[in-house]
Image (cartoon, grey):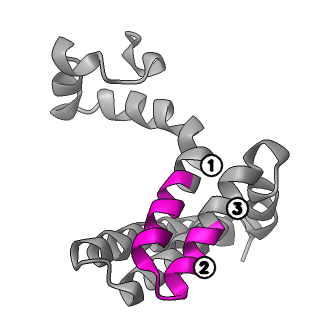
């Protein structure tokens, strides 16, 4: 097996793990902050990120100086969820998540804006003013 073949499949597995992590996290929140489901979601999400970009890149991403506040909040939130304080942990995780991954939102919104059905809805003037500035540019 070649390295690119293995890495390609590992990335696909990582996307699946990340998606299941988000699913379990949302399910845990919908079921009145079920700590078990939220913990499973956190573990799957972190495993998926590590599988997508690699363990070393994941460690570098989470330990960058400009992201340290988000990392502390995100990992602290996960610790609180695992310690059976799911509401407080979830709030801290969301704050950390926004600090860590907030730079990616304009790229995601730009991609979603190009989708056939969702794009025209997001381009509506009433909705477009709430979108990040970078995603409002015409392509």
Check the picture and name the quadrant holding the C terminus. Answer: top left
Mark 3 highlights which residue? Answer: 72
Between disc 3 and disc 2, whose residue precedes? Answer: 3
Between 11 and 31, the one lying in front of the other is 31
SS under mark 1 = helix
SS under mark 2 = helix
- Magenta-highlighted residues: 75-95
Between 72 and 17, the one lying in front of the other is 72
Q: Would you say residue 23 sits in the magenta stretch? A: no
Main SS, magenta region, reads: helix
Q: Residues within 10 Å of mark 3 (few under 14, many from 20)?
A: some
Between disc 1 and disc 3, whose residue precedes? Answer: 3
Q: Is residue 49 left or right of residue 122?
A: right
Check the picture and name the quadrant holding the N terminus. Answer: bottom right
Mark 2 highlights which residue? Answer: 79
Q: CA distance from mark 3 to mark 2?
A: 10 Å
Place of residue 118 in the rendered image (x, y in percent of width and height, measured from the top left): 20, 33
Q: Would you say residue 83 sits in the magenta stretch? A: yes
Number of callouts: 3
Image mark for residue 100 = 1
Q: Residues within 10 Å of mark 1 (few under 14, many from 20)?
A: many
Figure quadrant of residue 59 = bottom right
Place of residue 14 in the rendered image (x, y in percent of width and height, measured from the top left): 54, 69
Place of residue 88 in the rendered image (x, y in percent of width and height, measured from the top left): 46, 70
Figure quadrant of residue 56 = bottom right
């Amino acid at each position: 097996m070649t390295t690119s073949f293995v890495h390609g499949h590992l990335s696909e597995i990582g996307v699946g793990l990340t998606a299941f992590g988000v699913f379990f996290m949302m399910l845990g929140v919908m079921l009145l902050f079920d700590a078990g489901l939220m913990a499973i979601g956190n573990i799957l999400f972190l495993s998926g990120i590590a599988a997508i970009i690699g363990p070393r890149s994941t460690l570098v991403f989470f330990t960058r100086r400009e992201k340290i506040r988000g990392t502390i909040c995100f990992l602290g939130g996960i610790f609180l969820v695992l310690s059976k304080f799911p509401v407080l942990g979830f709030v801290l995780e969301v704050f950390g998540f926004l600090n860590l991954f907030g730079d990616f939102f304009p790229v995601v919104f730009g991609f979603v804006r190009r989708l056939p059905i969702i794009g025209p809805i997001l381009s509506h003037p009433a909705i477009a003013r709430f979108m990040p500035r970078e995603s409002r540019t015409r392509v």
